[in-house]
């Protein structure tokens, strides 16, 4: 009787499966340990140990904020907002046609044009805004224009991907009903496709603008204009109270943009 009860005991895995899972975990832990050693082989651990003391020292130098410097920061902050806004608008203008070319139900050529459009979207999303800014500063020189174009080129991939996915998910019955009336391709696009994706496009655009506000604040670190230029200068001269003032302004701007973005998306939905 006891042997029968032992045979009936439930096991999640067989002994061989348990051993395989155990060996898999051993391999994963060994791989993680090896990658950690590779990543930290040049780390100076004395600096890491001393980091809390350095953080406390810099933190004490950053307070109180340099409130008197706020008057010279309004214009760079305004530049940052303009970089984000104009970059978003320019990226939107370029992303919309690319999205229609990339969507399987609106592309004129699924064998050539669609793969090219998808490649543009992937390339845009693969390169960070700072990298775009570095390239454009080298080509165009430092300034706001490089920042605007960097934001625009980065926005193409984000807007294009979400928009072409929304286009592919539209209600095909509405499109077929318009086509049945004898409407042309342009009329079908204008009255059957665009009205269905317009709210989604508006939400995507506002969301991307909110993201671009954040990204625009650091483009100045590579010479692409905006408040990041002042931040880079303050860090280079160890003007820690001014750095605090800049971080406060950036935080307030990001929170404000988040509030606007949330209100607009709520109104659209």
Image (tube, helix red, strand yellow):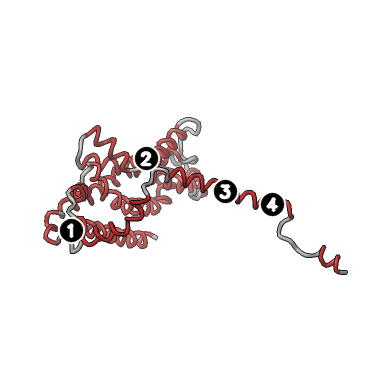
Tell which tag, 1 or 2, sits nearer the viewer: 1
For mark 1, what is the residue?
A: 241
Position of the C terminus, as image quadrant, is: bottom left
Q: How far apart are marks 3 and 1 (CA)?
A: 46 Å
Which residue is rendered at x = 21% and y = 47% of the image?
232
Alpha-carbon span between mark 1 and mark 4:
58 Å
As helix, strand or loop, the secondary structure at mark 2 comes to loop
Sequence order check: which comes first, mark 3 or mark 1?
Answer: 3
Name the residue that disc number 4 marks.
19
Q: Which of marks 4 and 3 is nearer the N terminus?
A: 4
Tell me the element at label 4: helix
Give the image location of residue 52, x and y in percent: 32, 59
Q: Where is residue 133 in the image (x, y as percent from the top left)?
A: 28, 40
CA–CA distance in space, label 1 to label 2: 33 Å
Tell me the CA gap for discs 2 and 4.
43 Å
Asked if residue 53 is positioned above or below residue 186 in the image, the reply reads below
Task: Mark yes or no: residue 156 visible.
Answer: yes
Q: Earlier in the sequence, mark 1 or mark 2?
A: 2
Q: Which of marks 2 and 3 is nearer the N terminus?
A: 3
The residue labelled by disc 2 is 127
Q: Could one spot residue 78 in this view of the protein?
A: no
């Amino acid at each position: 009787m006891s042997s029968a009860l032992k045979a009936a005991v439930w096991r999640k895995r067989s002994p061989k499966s348990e051993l395989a899972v155990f060996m898999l975990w051993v391999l994963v832990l060994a791989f993680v340990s090896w990658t950690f050693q590779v990543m930290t082989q040049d780390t100076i651990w004395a600096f890491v140990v001393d980091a809390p003391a350095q953080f406390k020292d810099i933190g004490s130098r950053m307070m109180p904020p340099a409130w008197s410097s706020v008057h010279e920061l309004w214009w760079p902050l305004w530049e940052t907002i303009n970089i984000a806004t104009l970059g978003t608008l320019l990226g939107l203008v370029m992303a919309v046609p690319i999205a229609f070319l990339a969507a399987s139900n609106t592309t004129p050529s699924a064998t050539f044009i669609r793969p090219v459009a998808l490649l543009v979207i992937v390339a845009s999303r693969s390169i960070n805004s700072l990298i775009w800014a570095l390239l454009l500063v080298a080509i165009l020189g430092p300034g706001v224009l490089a920042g605007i174009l960097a934001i625009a080129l980065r926005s193409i991939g984000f807007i294009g991907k979400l928009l072409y996915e929304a286009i592919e998910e539209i209600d095909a019955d509405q499109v077929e009903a318009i086509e049945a009336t004898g409407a042309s391709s342009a009329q079908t696009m204008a009255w059957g496709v665009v009205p269905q994706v317009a709210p989604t496009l508006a939400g995507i655009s506002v969301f991307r603008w909110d993201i671009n506000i954040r990204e625009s604040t650091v483009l100045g670190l590579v010479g692409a204009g905006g408040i990041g230029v002042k931040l880079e200068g303050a860090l280079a001269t160890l003007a820690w109270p001014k750095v605090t003032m800049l971080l406060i302004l950036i935080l307030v701007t990001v929170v404000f943009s988040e509030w606007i973005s949330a209100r607009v998306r709520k109104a659209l939905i």
